Image (spheres, rainbow, N blue to C red):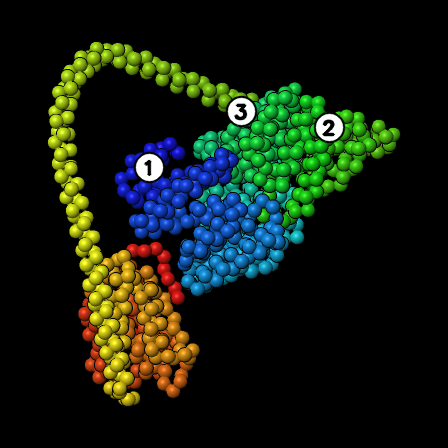
Amino acid sequence: MLSATLVDLNGARDDTMEIRLLLRLSYIYYWLDETRHHHEGDSAVFFAQQAMALSSQTNFTEGLTESEFLRCRISIDRSDLAGAKRIVDMTFGEERIRLLIVIGEHYVLQAAPVGKDSSKIAYSVLMEALSLAERLHSNYWLIASMAMLGQYYYANGQITRGQEFFFRIIKMFEQNHDVASQAYWWAKMENYMPYAPETYSMQLSDYQKAIDLYLSIGETAEAAEVYGAMAFLAKTMNDFDYAKKLYFKKIALLKEAGGRNIYEAFLYLAEIYYAEGNLDSALNYALQALRNIELLHADEYLSVAYKSLGDIYRSMNEGGRSSYYYRLSIDYGESPAFKKNYGYAVLRSYIATLVSQGKASEALAFAKNYISASPPVSMFDEEISENVLGTCYDAVGNIDMAETKYLEMIKWDTFCQANLGKEMYLTANIVGAEAYYEIGKFYVSHDRYREAQPYLDKALKFENKPAPLEKDVNYLQFKTDSASGNLGSAIRHYQRSVFLKDSLLARERLKELNFLNVQFETAEKERNIKLLEKEAQLQNRKLQESAQLRMWSGAAMLLLVALLAILYSRNRLKNKKNIQLQGQQEIINEKNLSLSQLVREKEWLLKEVHHRVKNNLQIVTSLLNSQSAGVGEGPVLDALLEGKHRIQAMAMIHQRLYNGDEYGCVLMPSYISELVDYLKESFNPGTRIIFKLCIDPVALNLSVAVPFALILNEAISNSLKHGFPDGREGTVTVELRSLGGQTKVLKVADDGIGIPPSVDESNPNSFGLRLIRGFTSDISGTLKIERSRGTSIVIVFDVNEEARFSGANTF
């Protein structure tokens, strides 16, 4: 993918395609840096910056937002909070919300539990995102902000506070009668919640609400997926019987909905039966899962199926087959999700099988390489990595180093146990009984029974131990009790170990397992035969093609000689043409230079025209100021001030055209803000009248901008002069909206006393209203005056030219 994208970049046909290819390269390098630890973050930043620079030059909004998003994510992943905030400060509107959530998500979902400093950062940025989403009335980002705040409180152990945000989301969809979205968020609320015994019954109840809602609208497949999430919760809580019942319901619903992807349920059933010691059922479901995965080509699940088969064959003491499947699981397990959930657990199992086969040096080398290439990303992986290295060093005879690694494992286990309930997503681990069994086994293997005893005692105190593990711990206890002379306890532990061993290795189950093995091996042989037949067919086809190739080679040589002669002749002609074209190109270049000079002169002259128009208008304004200074209060002074305001509105247009780079267009957000500030200063209403502006990113050409400015001046001036008599307080709202295409809407509204009923909208006596109606006609717009709760002047008009620039301004 990387090579192909680089080739496409060199052949990009236009700027937009080049920007999209630069962004794709940035994403690829970011993915390599995150998933494979190739240290490609600098390359990802480089291509994102290239995309951002080109997007700025071409005003390509999509490229700007995506490059800012990538740069922010890379900065925060590198713990460069200051760099991420600098990028956020360059954005506004919905894009700012998106980046704030990226920063908050990083600190909420980091591998270790949320610390005090991280918690403050996460809360601050997420609350800012929520506040901005509420101001923009953006439901999408409002939901995203509340969902992440819910996860924030979950990670801090405040389950009830976190649920409040999810309940607000569900309430929004209840008001819209959106049943599917209600069901989705009932399930999501529990998916995000950390698993703990005290919340188990509540989580099951909420999952059931989601299922009932989905089934009420006939969404069977979605209900099946919630059953799967509910079953996984029950499995995690060691409620195996209920988990199996739920997985069978999921399978039944998927079949009812016509779905064939039932491999995930089969894999989890295999895990449950394996944990119960029922190896025949575990193998049965693991093989069914593998067949379903191969049938549907769901290759991303192959690594999980191979892991399950490796575990089962290892419990059956088939080391060769077990190590084969573990290695397949590691080789296929490239996805980040697999590495996070199972990567180190599979490594541990694979290393154990290599050591049992006498390949200790190979195991140590493989373990070091794996840990170096894929460093631990969680406390659980850290514990497993210490266990793996302890096993390897013990096997190669480095006892001191092995003991050091096992003791480090126990330190990590203490930390893991303290934080197990705070983890939002559980991964495969050896926390508890298994860790203490491992260090106890190490000491027993070196006849250090006294040191082994406390660890084995603690291992037995943990509840819900898998049957195979309980068997092994009891056997080691038998050996330590025998060595210490505690024969009564030794006999009890030995009897318990034998009982568990017999239940795991019963003859009838072994017969059934052998039968399933034969079936699986037969299916593999049949598949290999088909592959060999296909290879033979391909070989015959290659032989036929080779004979045809020899037959045509002679004719091809003759044709090649003829083509060479023709090419030589054409090449001479081409060289002559090139010389002629070079001369013509030089002439064209000289003309282009001359045209470029003319364009620059034209631009300078146009700016000079705007400057002089502005100066002339300023002179008129000064004359009106001088005239008004000698006139007392009354209609004459009012008329002079109104004329001054109108001329100033036009002068500000020409001032912006002179100062800006867009010679034919005026950007409305900044212009309207400046005009409002000018009128506020002129009328001096103080704090009793509040202005609210909400302006979309609209740019108007000069022919529309001037009448638009005069309309706006008249509307605001009327509100300030007539809308709030006798010192009344109120609000003046100015909105400019884009309705899509070229249609725009201007609205100037106040909550003052309103236009008297005696004023006729269609034939007004007021000079200001006549001006508004006249200028509305000039821009081919329609005028509507609303008198409810004050006065609203609404003008809808179309524009033919519009400048593009990113973002939206809300004042």
**Whether label 3 touches label 2, CB < 8 Å:** no
Q: Nearer the viewer, mark 3 or mark 1?
A: 1
Instruction: Tell which circle, 3 or 1, labels the residue nearer the N-terminal end.
Output: 1
Q: Can you identify the residue that label 1 sits on?
A: 9
The correct choice, above or below, for 204 with respect to 774 in the image is: above
Q: Residues within 10 Å of mark 3 (few under 14, many from 20)?
A: some
Residue 699 image-quadrant placement: bottom left
Q: Cα distance, mark 3 to mark 1?
A: 48 Å
Residue 810 drawn at (x, y percent): 39, 64
Numbered disc 3: secondary structure: helix
**The disc label shown at residue 520, or none:** 3
Q: Amino acid at mark 1?
A: Leu
Q: Amino acid at mark 3?
A: Phe
Q: Can you identify the residue that label 2 sits on?
A: 400
Residue 592 image-quadrant placement: top left
Determine the residue positioned at 72% across, 31% down: 403
The correct choice, above or below, for 692 with respect to 226 in the image is: below
